[in-house]
Amino acid sequence: MEYTHNDHDPKKEPPVSYAEVNDTVLKMLEPPGTGWFLLLFTCLFFLAIGASCWFYQMWAGFGESGKSHPIGWGTYITNFVFWVGIAHSGTLISAVLYLFRANFRQPIYRLAEAMTVFAVMTAGLFPIIHLGRPWYALWLIPYPNQRALWPNFRSPLLWDVFAVSTYFTISATFFFVGLIPDIAAARDRATTPFRKILYGATSLGWRGSHAQWKHYTSAYLIFAAFATPLVVSVHSVVSWDFAMSIVPGWHATIFPPYFVAGAIFSGVAMVITLIIPLRKAFNLHRLITPVHFDAMSKLILLTSGVVSYSYITEFYTAWFSNNSFERFQFWFRPFGEYWTAFWGMTFCNCIFPQLLWIKSLRTNIAFLFILSIFINIGMWLERFNIIFQSLTREFIPAAWGGYNFSWIEIGITVGAFGWFGMWMTLFIKYFPSVAITEIKEVLPPPMRKTNSGAHH
Amino acid sequence: MSDSSSRAVVGIFTYMDDALEAVKRVKAANFDYRMYSPVPRHEIEEVTYPEKSPVRIVSLIAAITGCTFGFTLSILCSLDWPMRTSAKNIASVPAFFVPGYECTILFGGVATLFAILVFCRLPNVLKTAGYDPRFTHDKFGVVVACTGGQVEDVKSRMMDSGADEVDVRDSL
Amino acid sequence: MEGQIVQLKGRKEKGGEPESSGLVSISRRRFLQVLGAGSAMGAAACASPVKQEIVSYVKPDPEQIPGVATWYSSTCTECSANCGIRVRTREGRAVKVEGNPHSPVNRGSLCALGQSSLQSLYDPDRIRTPLKRKANTPTGPQFEPVGWDEVFSKLGDALTKATNKKVLLTGELTTGYSDVAQALSSQLGFTHVVWDPIQPVAVAQAAKMTYGTFGVPTFAIDKAQVVVNFGADFLETWVNPVGYARQWSDSRRSEHPLRFVHVEPRLSLTGANADLWLKSAPGSEVSMVLFLIKEMLGRGRGEGLSADVRSKLTALTKGVSAETVEHETGVSKEKILLVAEYLASAESSLVLAGGTAAATADPLPLLVGVNFLNLILGNVGKTVNVAEAKKPASSAKALSDAIDDMQNGKVDVLVVYGTNPAFTFPDSFGFDHAVNRVGVKGEGTGKGAGIVVALSSHLDETAQLADYVLPVHTSLEDWGYATTPGGAVSLIQPSMRPIFDTRSAGDVLMTMAANSGKAIGGDGKTFDALVKAGFLKAAATADIGGDLERFWMASLERGGYFPKGSSPTSAAAGTVDAAAHQLDFKPHAHTVHGDELLLYPFPSVKSFDGRAANRPWMQELPDPITQAVWGAWAEVHSKTAKRLNLAHGDALILRTDDGEVQLPVYVSDYVHEDIVAVPLGQGHSAYGRYAKSAGQGNVFSLLPKTLAKQTDVLPMLSAHVSVLRGRGDGGLVVTQEFSSQMGRDLAKTKMLTGVAAAAAHSDGHHGSGYGSHGANDHGAHAGHHEVKQMYHQREHPLYEWGMNIDLAACTGCSACVVACYAENNIPVVGKKIVSQGREMSWIRIERYYDSVPTESGGEELKVSFMPMMCQHCQNAPCEPVCPVYATYHNEEGMNAMIYNRCVGTRYCSNNCSYKVRRFNWFQYEWPELLDWQVNPDVTKRTVGIMEKCTFCVQRIAEAKDIAKDLGRSVEDGEVTPACVQTCPTQAITFGNLKDPNSRVSKLAKGDRAYKVLDHHLNTQPAVSYLEDIRYKA
């Protein structure tokens, strides 16, 4: 796709120039206004709530959360899976679409990647928060210790440790490498000494010589190649936490693809949720255009389809297996005590997104924003249904039980959003949250002989 | 008279094709040059660095190492402390696929990062002679290292290929 | 000797305590106790209330090795069955109570109540010094500590000044104590009144009337082919629950199991174990008895009876027909005829009546009718043993007379011991007020010399009314002996040194007597000496051999004198008394109208009459039928609930003219529409923190001031309560909300056909007397189905521990649960946390309501009880998912749990298909004194980690140590986990599956054997179950 705006703009604007890209993007880094501080403090406030809730829970005992017998996992693991899911679109957009040369990715991928990194940082907290003895979390790491103990490599939870930590490391590296040239650009026009030092240090003295670019681009390609299988693997591994168990409603081979699709689904939704206000606040209309929203809408439509299909397959498998426990579980979800969660999920993830078949809605920013929020909720509910509903009705009826939400859990959930938001807020103000270089890459380079236009 | 002091001639171009033209010309005269650009472009690569980058080799080796490490770690840990869980084998290799797989990517990725740093000479704290902030903005630059005597020749080559400006600096 | 010195030192510190602790009789044993206890107290320097005394093991006694348990044999006095017990002490502290295998009463088993007696010993609310009433405040009476001497002097001159009656009010006493009581009444002129609300006095009187001897006969349940029972809860609280449960199960698991029909208005635990449970209108049972008499006579039975009696009975039962019975009882005609058929066709049978169902305003017709039915069926002398009768001394009449006397100022001295009438006797009789009038001569005059003394270890409702409360030993610190109908004489001896400044009630009474110059059993005689003398006298019936002292020591070790072959079931013929002729059998069916219901108070294994209410274990123990914990509830039939617009869990107010209580509603289909069933024993206003916190519900406060016709017993079925809906939630907490198996075949049942006789006649062609298999039979052999294994199974070098649970024998009595709490330091978490589903019990008695087919193609209720603990699966789902190996499979086939490795991911619990893992949601602490009971062999768990059944691994380790010393491997039966040890019906078997000849291996291969969920999940549990059995109705 050629990066011009004529396709949506009747009066032919001139194409965006290199200079304009730098100006618009780096403008975002100008000293923050009150609005930004307001946002930051809101996030910090939420974070404080979450942190105090967690400490209270550790002090008073894990029972302060709503878990119980037989529901050993609840809100925290739901949040874990939810945030890991969010984390996915980042790498998907940056890596997979990079390999596919889908050019609508350029303006949004940086934000998506930032989202990935911070979402993983958020997700990573929950397995620790949910431990009965969080202070021993490090026992899951295979390090030589005086107790001469090693972790159990057969446990899906240990796989999580590997998957999530790898995912974090790689996406963070990928993210940072992508940033280097842009930080260099910021450095070269930085005015305050603080920013001079900050960018000077973080750009590692990048110059953009032809040799640097050469290694850079080939390395970037390799990163993309590494990150792409991660997108698939991480959420597959997370899904194995459930699929490897024998709990009716968990023990299903469809989980890995199902979870990956769901992850992308929720991730893209979250990107939209974040990018719409950003675009408005920093007036990026010429960089992030309806074209991109249209593309993302299509991605949502696709993944929504996959997710819906997975839901149906789950029910079919349960029925076809003729396993009374599975059958009961899948009768219970839509018609049991907690039917609201199920139908809420179905509406948000399967029905509502279908409106995107209408082209005008695909580029209707307001609608997309609302939709994305609904999808986020829907995906949270999906994880909740899987984790919680399955656990309430297992094999032994005498051991069936319910769940009692506690304000501690709600507090910690809110805190997670605060933590995530805090990083996002800081990031957009201090680093280029739109990829300068990559946008430039798809712009036609300034040529004297215009006939030989830029091509890729 | 011939001046043998070392100089850096910096040509600043608005248009990429001009800059490339200048590169071709200084190359023709076997000058040691360096080209700066705000973005990587294959046109530039074709002229300046046609051969493949060695980064890939590093990544590959690291990835293979990682894979071996992942499996070895899980197998050795299990054997070192043989705990029977359920009826599963002590070293149940299928389960160890995940650590192996993740380590492959982890090692490969991290190694690639180091590769970049090494090959791109990063981090680089020294001032580079002939670098201009505009190069990260919208200008292309060609910097040629030459002796005082050759300055004029280089200058002319650049001007002819359409540089907006050419200035000469001490390359120290 | 050193022991003596220590002893005397301890004695001096006590300050002039009379020689009362048996130094004379057995100094060595006492020395050991002091030594042990002393060291324990040294160790427990933090336990503040204790007089501390450090005794070093300079010369360690071979019997007192630190870390090695010392056992003392004694007798359980929780109910009047007097089971033999063995108390396990560690470093001088009692930590576990178990049944004494020598005792013929319980044959080594013990019920939940007996298991919990430790928590009476270590009750944090125990009285620690003598108390004197200071003042009455709105919050209740205030007491201040006083010295023993003051009490005795006060008591002394009260006795000398006393011009009026002196009343000694006690509970049902063990023989040792009744000796003292007799002496008091004969020598000091005390009137001895006994009150124990759950003594089957009416049954004893009916026996007097029919057989001529007062007393509850002993029954040979295992000798009967058919048992028809009208409300006698012999598997729960009736007469000798442990003994009868064993008899019942012995027959049920035999080749020719008895057929059991139970008739009552509310499904009791006993009824839940019946083949055929019939819901009768309250008080209507007598009409069915009459019909059965008529039927049996009609079939030419009753040869043994004189023609005269037969004709009398025929005349009495003329008007009765299946139709009238159906009309009166609400039991369908077919069923009634079926019961008649069973009885008629059985070679031997047994008809029982008792419990609340029989506690009507006129109990005799039913009870005597049942006696006659037994006579007609020729059961007397076969399954009914009149000769060995238990003679309850409890009398409501005597108590109410005493109350009147007190009311009228005719009593100057009241001494209360071992009973709590202020709680267990209807308020309508006004015991509370009466007590305040002791010694009051006339209006206006003060109490004068009148005195009320309570000998009690708890400040219960009655003790609170006393002027002086004297802290006495609990039976684990006390002496005594008890004779049982079988001729066995069971000894009670202290298992540890008294914790507080308490004394033996016997010594207190004897000192009292001695002070007024009437020394009982000779001057300076102490209670333990009296006990010794009394015991030797009682035991002297058989030849003891020359050396009395040796016999005494031997008896102390065995726990008493248990003559060979003396089991409570040896038969002796009975005689019919012509007094039967005076009877008129009129059914006294109750009628209720409007929002009025008949109150149906019942004792349960959980609370009896309230004596165990301050024991956390018993409060947290789920009631086997309702699964309710902490406090009482009101069972109402679903129809009635609908009519009165009540929902499960609502608050419900029960009101009579005499009182009002608020209770949570428990909606059930297994109570009669006209009744509201409430367990006894809850709703304490005093007694202790746990009893009080458990909430309202003392039904005694609702009963009217009436005594039953002729028998003068307390009629439980006498209160018509008006039922109002209370405000909001009633605070009902149950541990099991779902009662259906969802057709998942968890607790399987094998259906037997044909009447018992037919089953009995089959000479075991098919190896057993079972008829055709029933509906649930498919998968009966799932226990040993072969599945292709993906992994080669683990080898177990020496042992592969396994368990077997016979559902046909399990009655659901929950003794195992309490035993497990005691053995494994399982924390009691309290009502709130249980309501969040976080109870910690390692064993869960699952209760399922199913229906089974009948011969006539109908359906009958089938209640299943299923003890569920860790199944120690070969392919345990919990193990591979733990990231830190906190749980793994050890080489003895056990699913090991390493607490300090656990980080608390709870993945194992999610993945446990049996849901038997419990997580420590909080840091649970033992209140001071209760922590004395903690078993030193078992780790206390900390917050944030998982725990579960370990097969009592500490006992396995102990057995292996012993075996190792003997240079051999552990043999079958040497390891008995706490649950196995205590099970009254021996339904649980534990052993080494590796050994093909061990009982557990054999059972696991039996044709009733199966493993839960195994054929679904291939978890290969080490715990196998044997299908329950049911006769097709």
Image (cartoon, coloured by chain):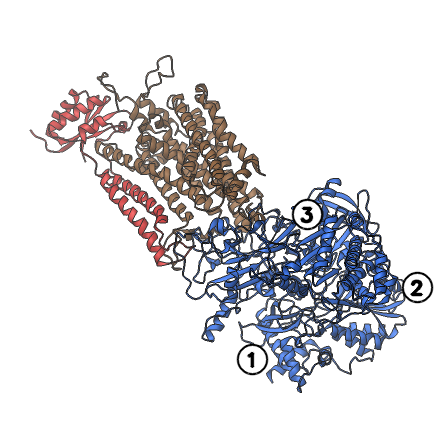
| Amino acid under disc 1 | Asp
* Label 3: which secondary element: loop
* Residue C67 x, y percent position in the rendering: 53, 71
Residue tagged by mark 1?
C61
Q: Quadrant of the N terminus of chain C?
A: bottom right
> Which residue is rendered at x = 42% and y = 33% of the image?
A267
Q: CA distance from mark 2 to mark 1?
A: 62 Å
Residue C731: which numbered mark, if any? 3
* Label 2: which secondary element: loop
> Which residue is rendered at x = 34% and y = 27% of the image?
A106
Chain that appears red: B
Compared to residue B80, the image places residue A110 above or below, namely above
Near mark 2 (Cα within 10 A), the count class, few <14, some 14-19 or many ≥20, is few
* Residue A385 x, y percent position in the rendering: 51, 38
Q: Earlier in the sequence, mark 2 or mark 1?
A: 1
Q: CA distance from mark 3 to mark 2?
A: 46 Å
Chain designation of label 1: C
Q: Colour of chain C?
A: blue
Question: In the current view of this chain or complex, which residue is farthest to the top?
Answer: A11
Residue tagged by mark 2?
C442
Between disc 3 and disc 2, the foreground one is 3
Chain that appears brown: A
Chain designation of label 3: C
> Which residue is rendered at x = 82% and y = 72% of the image?
C154
Q: Are marks 3 and 2 in contact (CB under 8 Å)?
A: no
Left-right relation of A252 to C675: left
Q: CA distance from mark 3 to mark 1?
A: 53 Å
* Label 1: which secondary element: loop
**Which is nearer the eye, C319 or C981?**
C319
**Which is nearer the eye, C869 or C278?**
C278
**In the image, are marks 3 and 1 on the same chain?**
yes
